[in-house]
Amino acid sequence: MWTVLALFFFCVGRSQGLNVDVAQTKAQTQTSISRRKFVESSAIFGAVTLSPRGATAAPSSIANRFDSDVLKSPPITAGTKFTGHENLVFPDYLEGEWDAIQTLVSTKAPLGLKFIGGPQASLDIAQKTMDEQAKRVNEQVNLKLRFVKTNFGVVEDRAFNLRSRLDSFAGKSVVASVNYADVKESNRASVLASGGKEDDPLTTTLVYFKGPAAQKTFVISHGQDPLDKDDWSGYELDRSIFALTNNSIAPPVTTDTEVIYSFSKVGSDRVEGNLRLAGYLNPQSDSLYFEAQNRAVSLTDYTLTLKRSDTN
């Protein structure tokens, strides 16, 4: 997602953005872990869904999920399964376009290195991943983010933001196109039938990269704490499927990434916060899935600073 993390995840680095271009020249095992890290990294600035139905499945306090290294994957929320239009709704004060700075402050493997070593649990790959992440601690990444007002609330311009963060973390233009995909959980017909507009963002995206790769990302769980004056916390669980589009026989990589946000409005034109990316194993891709017992295998923490673009 990332994309990463398992994220970003998940630590996203500029070198990860380059992995798409050279994946076909590597051994299958290394290709798989490179793609996993890239997928995770696209989750770096994922969206957080706000809705009453989503909130019922959220932890008692999402903000507390920043304080523990023992996290379990949230359950799939009913809201994203049946409405057909539910989008990610943010606090009203995020409406507009922002200049964002995302800074890596910590990266951990709470269950041990073998759990982040790719499909075959390679300790060599895991150690190289952690070493690369350690080099990026305190590294700042600048990116543009946009949030738009809809009849359902303020949501992120997902296509714009996804391209922005993928290109920004890669350090160059790596995205060829980003499109919304109609699925049962989020489709144009349901949006329009519920009073939405033709240009409202959907929650499922399909990215084609300039290299021979594509990624489809779904929102499978979300929730939030109640807005406390200008403080807000929320989470989203994204499932990404990353595949090579050439003649490679390497199988697609599926990753689950929980994106946890904590935002505080510190002025009309400034928002500060924290971002945690929690990576979980997936039964389709990871040999240690059952041993992980639905617990996060990677934790990557960032600080976030958003300044309204039109104030510069």
Image (cartoon, rainbow, N blue to C red):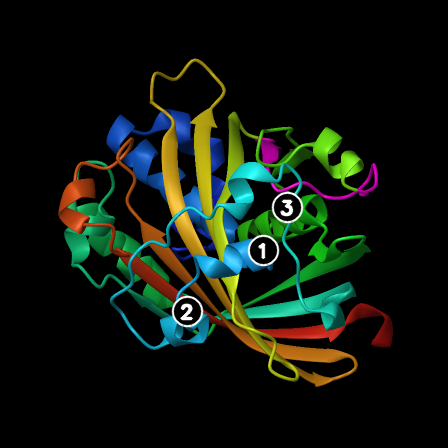
Residue at 60% x, 31% y is 210
Was residue 197 drawn as part of the magenta stretch in this picture?
Answer: yes
Quadrant in which the C terminus appears: bottom right
**What is the quadrant of residue 146 in the picture?**
bottom right
Residue type, mark 3 in image: Glu
- Classify mark 3: residues with Cα within 10 Å, few (<14), some (14-19) or many (20+): many
Helix, strand or loop status at disc 3: loop
Whole-percent x, y for residue 29 in the image: 25, 32
**What is the quadrant of residue 251 in the picture?**
top left
- Classify mark 2: residues with Cα within 10 Å, few (<14), some (14-19) or many (20+): many
**Residue on which disc 2 sits:** 301
Whole-percent x, y for residue 110 in the image: 22, 64
Whole-percent x, y for residue 276 in the image: 43, 66
**Residue on which disc 1 sits:** 47
**Residue on which disc 3 sits:** 86
Secondary structure predominantly adopted by residues drawn in magenta: loop
Gap in angstroms between the C-alphas marked 3 and 2: 27 Å
Helix, strand or loop status at disc 1: loop
Whole-percent x, y for residue 73 in the image: 33, 54
The magenta segment:
195-210
Residue type, mark 1 in image: Ala
- In-front residue for pair 197/283: 197
Above/below status of 184 relative to 300: above
Above/below status of 76 relative to 13: above
